[in-house]
Every structure is written in C-alpha cells, then in structure tokens.
Amino acid sequence: MEPRFVTWVPAKNGNHPKFAVHAGIDKGNKLYVARARYNNGVIPGKVVVGHTSAYISYDGKEVPMANYEVLVAPPATLSWVDCLGSNIPPFALPGGQDPNGETYYIGRVFHQGTVTVGKVHPSHGTCYVPHGGLEYPYTDYEILVKNKLGRAMNV
C-alpha cells in the first residue's frame, strides 16, 4: 500500500523500504535519500542499492552507517529544484540538524559521473555529498522540496 505521508522509516545494512525517495544513481545502482544519527546530529545522506551501509558526509569524510532512516513518500509529493548557496526555497524539506541544532536540508549534485545526495548546510551555503571516502562541497545543487499540492507531512 502506498504511504499517505512523507516520513522516515528505520532501516539497516543497505536495505530500503518500498516507496523510498529515489535520489540518483552511482555506477548503475539507484540511490535513495537516507539520514543517520552521528556526532550529536542527524545527517542526511544516501543509501546505495547493493551496498551494506548508508553514507553520510561529515568533517571532510564519507561515513558509512549500518543503521539509518530512509525517506519514503507518496508519488508526486516531492520534487528536486535548482538551488544556489544559502537561498533555501520556502518548501525545502528538512532532513536533519547539525550538532548545534541548525537545520540540514537534502541536496543532490552531479559528481564524478554520478547523481549523488547529501546534506545542505544553509549557514555554509553549501551542499556536501559523500563519495569515495570523502566529502565534497558544492554551492550549486538541487534541493528536495515539498510540492505545494502534496499530501500532509509527517516528518
């Protein structure tokens, strides 16, 4: 049955639930939006089909996480829109927070032949993505937003 709300579902060991939000592709494998608790924060990242972890970026590194949450949503409730720096659109979907409580949003970029997902840190004006063991910064990225006519949120 299709979900009625946008919500986060616990997962582990590379698994993802039905209706997970598709975010990109890496070497032919689909990526889904994930987040994990790390260093007193909740960090948006990715889960890659065929891998045994989700990945977040933190302090210059790609960090594998065995336990995480995956974003699920009814069809047509979310969209990716262009974003630049700290110009966060009004319907951007919060994805977590840094250890000081600043809201992270969910962003994605084209990086080294992949479309990969990571965290948008508004005060930095940057989307940070995990890839190949490192964290990469981008000031020009796409951000995940709630569609105005989308269904109610439960985030």
Image (cartoon, grey):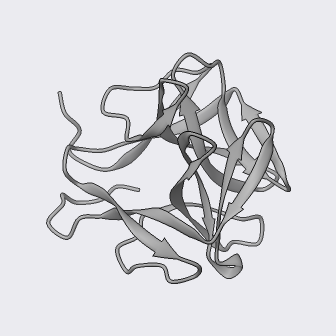
Q: Is residue 9 visible?
A: no
Q: Please name the residue shown 41% across and 56% down the image.
A: 155
User: Relative to 116, does residue 17 appear above or below in the rendering?
Assistant: above
Q: Quadrant of the N terminus?
A: top left
Q: Please name the residue shown 54% across and 54% down the image.
A: 109
Which residue occupies the foreground of this view, 143 or 111?
111
The quarter of the displayed image where residue 78 is located: bottom left
Q: Is residue 57 visible?
A: yes
Residue 52: x %, y % from top left? 65, 18
Residue 55: x %, y % from top left? 67, 37
Q: With 7 as the anchor, is 12 left or right in this view?
A: right
Q: With 111 as the anchor, is 141 left or right in this view?
A: left
Residue 106: x %, y % from top left? 51, 58
The quarter of the displayed image where residue 30 is located: top left
The quarter of the displayed image where residue 82 is located: bottom left
Residue 39: x %, y % from top left? 82, 52
